[in-house]
Amino acid sequence: MFTIMEAADAVRLIPDGAVIGLNSFVGTANPEKLHDAITESFRKTGHPRNLTLVSSAGFGLFDPDRGAENYIREGAVGKLICGHFGSMPSTKKLVLEDRFEAYNLPLGPMSHAMRAQAGGHDGYITKLGLGIFADPRVEGPGLNNISHDDSLVRVVNIEGEDYLRYRLPAFDIALIKATSVDAKGNISFESEYSTIDALSIAQLTRRNHGKVIVQVDRVKSDFSRPRDVIIPAVLVDVVVVCEPDRDNEAFGTLSGDIHVPATHMQYWYHRLEKENARSGKVRADFSADIIGRRAAKELKRGDIVNIGIGIPEKVSKYAAAEGILQDLTLSVESGGTGGLPAGGLEFGAMIGADSISDMSMQFDFYDGGGLDCCFMGALEMDRFGNVNAHRGVDQCSGIGGFGNITAATQNVIFCLTFDTKGLNVTEEDGRVRIHSEGTIPKIVDKVRSISFSGQRAAENGQRVLYVTERCVFTLRPQGLALTEVYPGIDKQRDILDRLPFPVLDET
């Protein structure tokens, strides 16, 4: 039987040393009030402490003073196992200071491992991750000098072929954000943008005889339709009711409360952009527009597509401008299919989605080659076509769903600038003009860490493009080829002389 409690009382159920399964997709469906209660408890009592936090998609809110970042920074956490750290600005820096153990696993295998282990299996076995940083023979998932847990990812051989086995620690506590609890204790997600791993996390926690704590917006006096229930009452121990802080009409397009036809997508996209602009999170970027417009030319009517965060978000903007958007099916790894991916703080949600599935089911589709093409960002690329999308010089953002999406999609388009920090580019009358170069190159002899293996992509016969603000490279079996130079760009001065290695010239 579930109990309704205040957040402060609920977090007293979390013992020191607990392993907590967190259900969120970056900032969406994030149990922020429960995080706040943990912070308050730790500040007052020093407990709970030595926590292990496990989250396939990450749980930051892009603000170091919100959510879990407070109690992580103040010392309540001993270990983090996450697919994505990019929305946690202070945490991703502390990781590299050896403040706690930290591990980065691809999002898809984490989601699948939760589902598999909830079903009594000894982890999840897949080829996803072979040849990239997560492979223990390449680098391993540990992100700093104190992270040496070799149980998370192991190489196994089955009938002469190598695979990776991903296994997560059993959960003592589940923290989940949902919308409603009905009269019996069933949990529904009608106003959330995604369900993510909610059911698997609750099942895995219950299998370990742990406590499932759910933050909801409201209590319903009636009973839910069975098909609307995401977490059945039998799995729920505690419900914390917290009324939502904001009530903006634009956000109803992300949950499905407002139906959005294709003709209205851009209107609502710009409404959300304005909301994010008020938070200071959006800035003009001419390079991104140049890249997004060129990358969008790779789209074909009827394609099923995934578009990543950052520069790739511009692809959907230009697909709409070209009139092709309504003939595409866009999707996001959090589970949404159809509609238009939201950007910024709402990344992971979709404006006017046709359907929203559990994340593990979305990755079933992706891993099976269901996508026709994908558009991904990159921190670095090298002479072999390898891409680093998860680890910078002084921070680790994490690989997220990037590994699954790029491993099984036939057409992979990376969107990145030639260099960064100081790059100033404009476009006038169809001609690109470079006013100043960046001081940090993004095309390097060898990437710092491998998120995408050019060698495996070539072996798999994938078509791979690298779209920048001045040119396009294409992956060939023998390495990179320069295949397009934009008007206004001097090929020798602006491209070839700035590369640290020779490329095939096919222009």
Image (tube, helix red, strand yellow):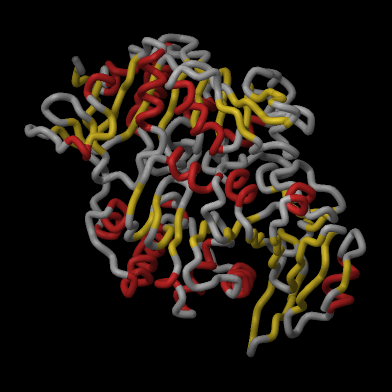
| Residue placed most toward the observer, 73 or 466 | 466
| Residue placed most toward the observer, 346 or 141 | 141
Residue 24 shows in this picture: yes
- Picture mark count: 0
Asked where in the image residue 7 lies, by quadrant, the reply is: top left
Residue located 70% across and 52% down the image = 379
Residue located 52% across and 26% down the image = 72
In the image: residue 67, left or right of residue 428:
left
Q: Is residue 348 above or below residue 169?
A: below
In the image: residue 382, left or right of residue 115:
right
Residue located 59% across and 75% down the image = 297
Q: Position of residue 504 (x, y in %)?
A: 88, 68
Q: Is residue 26 above or below residue 142?
A: below
Q: Is residue 59 above or below residue 146?
A: below
Q: Position of residue 58 (x, y in %)?
A: 50, 36
| Residue placed most toward the observer, 454 or 423 | 454
